[in-house]
Image: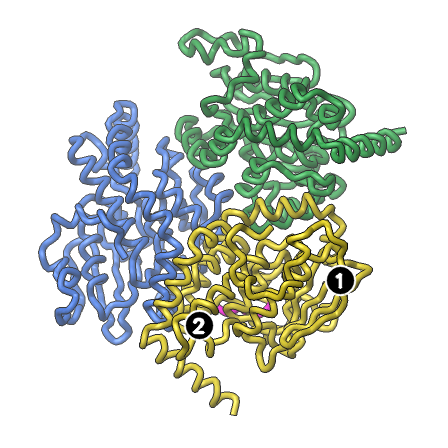
Chain colours: A blue, B yellow, C green
Amino acid sequence: SVPPGVLPLCRRLPAWGRAVRQHPGLPLAPCRAFSNNKIQVEMNESSGVATMKFKSPPVNSLSLDFLTEFCISLEKLENDRACRGVILTSAIPKIFSSGLDITEMCGKSTEHYAEFWRAVQEIWLRLYSSNMVTLAVINGSSPAGGCLIALSCDYRIMAENPKYTIGLNEAQLGIVAPFWFKDTFVNVVGQRVAERSLQLGSLYPAPEALKFGIVDELVPEEKLQEKATAVMAQWLALPDHARQITKSMMRKTVLDRLVAHREEDIKNFISFVSKESIQKSLRMYMEMLKKKKS
Amino acid sequence: SVPPGVLPLCRRLPAWGRAVRQHPGLPLAPCRAFSNNKIQVEMNESSGVATMKFKSPPVNSLSLDFLTEFCISLEKLENDRACRGVILTSAIPKIFSSGLDITEMCGKSTEHYAEFWRAVQEIWLRLYSSNMVTLAVINGSSPAGGCLIALSCDYRIMAENPKYTIGLNEAQLGIVAPFWFKDTFVNVVGQRVAERSLQLGSLYPAPEALKFGIVDELVPEEKLQEKATAVMAQWLALPDHARQITKSMMRKTVLDRLVAHREEDIKNFISFVSKESIQKSLRMYMEMLKKKKS
Amino acid sequence: SVPPGVLPLCRRLPAWGRAVRQHPGLPLAPCRAFSNNKIQVEMNESSGVATMKFKSPPVNSLSLDFLTEFCISLEKLENDRACRGVILTSAIPKIFSSGLDITEMCGKSTEHYAEFWRAVQEIWLRLYSSNMVTLAVINGSSPAGGCLIALSCDYRIMAENPKYTIGLNEAQLGIVAPFWFKDTFVNVVGQRVAERSLQLGSLYPAPEALKFGIVDELVPEEKLQEKATAVMAQWLALPDHARQITKSMMRKTVLDRLVAHREEDIKNFISFVSKESIQKSLRMYMEMLKKKKS
């Protein structure tokens, strides 16, 4: 399901991460719980459902390390024939993911910016085109890149808590959401809601997120697990093959667009993030976050 | 309104079926009730509205014979200047149409599969591009190809009966809805509802079909006729010419896509349906239906 | 923000109208209230918000003079760095704008038709691509071209009065809405609502307009001003640059389509409006309007 030309990040992956894909005829080792550092993966072998729990304090920000681990874990599951669905959720209270890690975008080299942005693209390409059923269980706030992760899944359940917000709020920081963030958003909420929300950088409390179609269902936080199991079972009741081809047909146009403009998109990111004005506001933003903490 | 290259099926049509199109200046014979076999056509000459009643027991499945007759009847009406609108409905209780006839896809020759699929394409091309106002009066369940027929009309009224369901449920049978089924669906319900529904092969009870925009209105079954007359009158109050060009402008992209990939789409169908695994599951499915009946 | 090739109308503009764009480094004269004839412009220098009040009795129809003045005023504001947002509203009770002025389309020369249509295109290109926040405060009915003006803004507030209607009702007059009217409409309400509404030439009373997404909010007429100020403040709270690029990204495809087919679109308009049958029905329509008045 991964479009051609999508693998550069994985040249850095350990060999075990790609073994199955390269030799699809080989017998598969049973996949059990594994955890590197920032993401805890549990596999229920009877249901064929894996759960990936983001556990990168304080706010599950998408650092290069986090993205690399996310990519490795996702590929491992993708290549595991016993795994048919994956649930993405957070092990940290009140936050699903805070989005891109700003420290990766501040005072680093051009090479670092390129590597970081390629990793962001990579995780989206893999998640949006995954052959598995992907279910976001949004048990906390999910701004910007965190929202993108949720939007890239097949279905979104959110905790029924108006204190949790979700949205592509890049514009509020003076940043423009990349075209493929926009495309993914339009595919979920339609052109009009996307146009207004992206311009305003809207963060929606859970009830409004439901109203505008950003998430599919709200559930009391203590029922999230139970609901996730039920929803996943409903999706897994379908034959994989027809579902996978259907998904690919629905998402192909948008996936192809990034694949076709990937290098250009990296250059744009570098040129944007290297501006002194942007560096300055990112530094100020980080100062503000530090003060807030202490 | 029919795009170029759409007429191969009609080479098989009797000459009377195409006379008007070829000689648009000739006087037209008044169109009255006619019925071949599987579709009953009545023409109300004072209102200019024809009613096509599907009457092919047990479940109005879209066999090659049904599709051919459908195509002939539709073309006859299309070429009749006195006919401005057509109502599609069923003469069989509880079912609008059960969709493609599986017996046409089972144990037949490659040539037969090609002929059958071309007929399915043909009826969609004609219906989706019809110059007439097309109104689906859905007085029973309407899965898969039956749903496509309804989606291709200008407006959909459904009986307010939660036992009647409608949807593109191909995925449930392990089949992928063709891209032009998908395009037609997206044009009605939008990308997100289509993506979820096609992957899950969802069949919606009437109230949910209304909620998701698959149909435009629900009406108690005994009021369907009356409502259909009122809705048709509303559409016919508009000047034909502007309405026809507007319709063509709205649907052109999607019509052009099938016209451009028609032969490829036929090849894909043949290659899919000829697989031993598919033949096997279709045979099992037919066995199950037979047992259910007895 | 204006796409290349969009400026022919402005060759007719006085030099002051383009000075700022051509010399972006020059100091700007403070922009205060100005009014030529048909549009009253007020500038609040502390908020950076201009208000354009349509004041062309009896019904703010879009004549060539009105459009030219609209274009000049809009460009003047666009080039004024102190102006970040513009509110479009009407100074005439019960009507926002009645749409294109039919007298411009009746009994005139081919050259006149071309000039008129180019001016209609121009105002849409400028408004739809404006760098300012554009807010339509719809304090009266707004059919056809009047609806297009509203649809081209970033946000629409309408008076909560069911006697006021809005919609692209061209089909009711036997006219086909141009493809870029359609594109703008689809971007606001989606494909399905646009397909049905354009074919039926639907004019929606305010409550239905809200339901179908044609406007974003209804407000009691006496609260319109207050609400407009609040909404504008919300939009202006965002950094301009990110908002502008985001807007451009969302609207580019549709803007580019007219720019690419502009001359063809003018030819189509001339060929349509020059038909004797159309001239006849426009004359009849004007007679009807005259009788209605007296």
**Picture quarter with the N terminus of chain A:** bottom left
Which residue lies at the image location 36% right of the left edge and 77% below the top edge?
Answer: B279
How far is mark 1 from mark 2, CA to CA?
Answer: 39 Å
Observer-nearest residue: A105 or C261? Answer: C261
Q: Give the number of marks.
A: 2
Disc 1: which residue: B229
The first of marks 1 and 2 along the sequence is 2
Q: Amino acid at mark 2?
A: His
Q: Residues within 10 Å of mark 2 (few under 14, many from 20)?
A: some
Disc 2: which residue: B112
**Secondary structure under badge 1?**
helix
Q: Which residues are magenta?
A: B202-206
Is residue B287 visible from the viewing direction of this image?
A: yes
**Picture quarter with the C terminus of chain A:** top left
Q: Residues within 10 Å of mark 1 (few under 14, many from 20)?
A: some
Residue projecting furthest to the right: C294
Observer-nearest residue: C18 or A32? Answer: C18
Relative side of B262 to A96, left or right = right
Residue projecting furthest to the bottom: B294
